[in-house]
Amino acid sequence: MNTICTMKSKCSLTMRYTSMALTAALLVWFYCVQPGFSSHSAVGWLVSSWNSETDYEHAWMVPLFSAAMIYQVRSKLAALPRTETVSWLPFLFLASGALLYVAGYRTMQGRVVIGALPFLLTGCMWFFLGRRAAWLCAFPFFFLWMAIPLPGFQQATVGMQLMATQAAHWGASLFGVQTVVEGTNIASATGNWDAYSIAGGCSGMRSLMALLMIAVAWAYMSPLSWWKKLILAGSAIPLAILGNAFRVTSIFVFAEYVDPSFASKTWHDWSGLLFFFPATLIGLTLLYSVLAGEIPFLKKKRTVVLRSNGPKERSAQ
């Protein structure tokens, strides 16, 4: 009897692993092999869209962050039971993903096809490993949406250009640099250097999306409460705007007091790496320390009261 049960268990396990392997092979075929987007597969189209024109050059890091999130919960996944009641709910995710894939493939909309992938992955995880496993991996799967270039992204960049221009004009005045603003062009009021144009690359939109990706992943993997996670993730927006404003301001300060050619070429090209990201990441670190209560002077002091159970002693007169 025990031998029969063992054989059934082995057969069931073999069927499970075979089904998982076939499902993974189908996903790889439809997303990495099947053409349909200008001779590209869905993943091929996505990778080709990570360029300077879409301001999504950072998007290759999104799958790495997603994998890191899943790796973080690997011990919890390993501890989950492998036997759960079969439910029809995972088929909702699978059906939604399949419909989105078909709709995106028929209309040649790569964003829709890639957007269907988290639904398919979550549904497969739920079907094979159970509800709790799907719950642990749902956020890392849907985090992949951050790798999809947003439509109308360039229109939003124009507004960020104007904001960066006004912020740089005001910031430069704090350092004694007088400037004249015309649209997105800034010129020296004293004629010390030629007019600079705040182009799309200086708008800060690219840096904003990259910092938002980092902040969201950081918030998810941190042990903070949910409302503190929201604060940490949302702080990427003001930090990116302020950091870019200071970066652009520094270009005009260098042009005024150091050398216009150095400011417009060398410092312009390297200020993002040497100034923006270190400053904003330090800001995120400080905010996380405040939220986690790790800054010494912000920690609450605990008062310890010692009580004696013995009789009170009278002081000698």
Image (cartoon, rainbow, N blue to C red):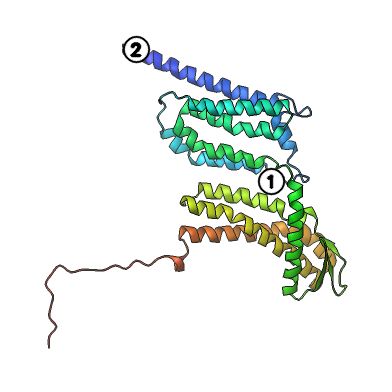
Q: Is residue 154 above or below residue 145?
A: below
Q: Residue 146 carries which label?
A: none
| Count of marks, rendered view | 2
Q: Which of marks 2 and 1 is nearer the N terminus?
A: 2
Nearer-the-camera pick, 149 or 305: 149
For label 2, the residue is 3
147 relative position to 132: left or right? right
| In this rendering, the label closer to the viewer, 2 or 1 | 1
Q: What residue type is labelled 2?
A: Thr
Which residue appears at 64% of the width and 34% of the height? 115
* Helix, strand or loop under label 1: loop
Q: Whole-percent x and y of residue 272?
A: 71, 57
Front in this rendered view, residue 66 or 4: 66
Q: Relative to 10, is 109 above or below?
A: below
Mark 1 neighbour density, 10 Å: few (under 14) some (14–19) many (20 or more): some
The part of the image, by quadrant, that contains residue 159 is bottom right
Question: x%, y% of residue 70?
Answer: 52, 38
Question: Would you identify the image quadrant in which residue 178 lies?
Answer: bottom right
Quadrant location of the C terminus?
bottom left
Image quarter of the N terminus: top left
Residue located at (69% from left, 53% from top): 207
Tell me what residue is drawn at x 72 percent, y 25 percent: 106
Badge 2 element: helix
Q: How far apart are marks 2 and 1 (CA)?
A: 55 Å
Residue 18 in view: yes
Residue 110 locus on image (x, y percent): 71, 33
Q: Can the viewer see residue 63 in this picture?
A: no
Q: Residues within 10 Å of mark 2 (few under 14, many from 20)?
A: few
Q: Please, what is the three-letter code of the amino acid marked with disc 1?
A: His
Q: Residue furthest bottom?
A: 317
The residue singled out by tag 1 in the image is 58
Q: What residue appears at the point 40 percent right and 14 percent down from the top-left corner?
A: 8
